[in-house]
Amino acid sequence: MPSRRPFAYLRVSTDDAHQDTSLERQFSAAVRCGVAEPDILIERESGRNSARPQWQRLQELIRAGEVSTVWADRNDRLARDLFEARAFFATCARHRTEWKFFSEPWLNSDAPEAAEIRDRAAYDAECESRRIGARVRRHYEHVRSLGVPVARRAPLGLQLEGRGEAKRYVLDNRPLAGSVSVADAARHLISDYLDARTMYTGLLRWRAWLKELKPIHEAKVHAAAMAFSPDGAGDWLELCAAELQGHVTLRRRKVLPAELGQKPKTRRMPWPEWELARDRHEALIEPATARKVLHLLAENSNKGRARATANEARSNGAIFPSFARFCVCGTCGSAVVMQGSRQPRTPGRPPHRSFRCRNANPMQNRCWEPGIGEKKLIYQLMPLLVAEAERVSALMVGGAPLKETVIDPALVTQLEQTRALAVTTGLPELRSAVVALESKLAASAATVRQSVEVEQGRKAAAERLAHLLPTIGPDLYTSAAVRRQVMAAIERIEVRGGEIVNVTLAGA
């Protein structure tokens, strides 16, 4: 039997250098708790991603019986999804593995009555992840309005410099190979494309020219350039309308009006309609050259891809949207994906699809839950939406009032008393305590507001379903329009043992 020993899981969200301090603090805490350095697993991934390599390795070690204790800094370092966190704690309990936190000892496995607190902490972590996403989108909209590039990677021939609102593009003058810089290689690709008049031939000429360059100074950039595909080169050349001639793209997608019960969609606009912030940095090519490239791209549009897109739009798979994107495995918390699809014999009927947990494929084999057919899933979904799920049915009748969480009155009283003492004594410690309590109260109020907004959204979704469900019957399986309307009101479908065990209405 393998020896059991403690492991530590350390995670930061991105590769930014400013997060290294957090990683060093977590590493020092793990060493102080007696975890050997080879047993410290370090991850630089978002907690919303369940396919993290070190996260999956940790769970495999737990199932193999090699882990006695899992150490982490906080509960949200493990996962930012409620179902995934529950599945992880269940796996630890099943294999007699303890879990402990450096900064939140009240959530440890041996803490009294910690199960409910852990669920609340996992829910808060998931809500915080969604708030972070909203803040990031607002930040991108703000900096984009100022003409600041928001791309994480600069296009070939340019580099990103600075941070925040001071971020900008500069020419990439690093030596690529011999006396040729990266910017020179980018200009050479544009010249080859204009001479060859086709993407495929121009890319072949450019690769042959790159192979002859020696010695190579930037091996990674050279390898990435050699791996340029016709699609990637086409997307890069389309940037001639903006970044390569000194501008920054503010908007190149247009939001289409949403149909009833559907989310709004976006469409890529033609390059003459793009919104640009002009002359923000040094240009890689001349505007006249950029116009030649764009007109040639319009002439050489991929007719084969256009036909394939049209065929896909006419196929049953595109007409009948799949419920797989809403499904999660009730055992391991992973996404449920489409396992197989077969076109029907009768034209106009939905395709025969089957779903199964993503971890149940032969390569991973980490979940043994059976699959479920889409037809069976849809017919099981009907009674759950109508009557079985308590929170769904309570909202659908329309008479249940919203449960508004009240802010802790003890916290408000403590803040008032501390503020009065700070005014009376003038001690700096009390002023710091007032600031900390105000921040805690503001966070609590934000949580209350968000929970109320979620419940209001679910009530609105349930009201839509209440008017829709009595009239649809089997149309949920055979009618694509009805299917889209019902899908717009669903957030999550939990599947276990080939059956639906829970349905959650959309709260947004």
Image: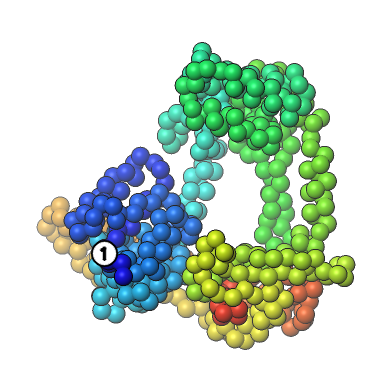
The secondary structure type at the circle numbered 1 is strand
Q: How many labels does the image show?
A: 1
Q: To which residue does mark 1 refer? A: 5
Image quadrant of residue 63? bottom left
Q: Quadrant of the C terminus?
A: bottom right
Q: In which quarter of the image is residue 132?
A: bottom left
Residue 401, above or below 315: below
At a point 76% along the width and 74% down the height, the residue shown is 477
Q: Where is residue 372 in the image (x, y as percent from the top left)?
A: 64, 75
Residue located 63% across and 39% down the image: 251
Which of the two residues, 276 or 373, is positioned nearer the viewer here? Answer: 373
Q: Is 353 above or below relative to 210?
A: below
Residue drawn 69% across and 27% down? Answer: 203
Amino acid marked by disc 1? Arg
The residue most toward the front is: 1
Residue 396 percent location from the top left of the image: 62, 81
Q: Can residue 248 be seen in this view?
A: no
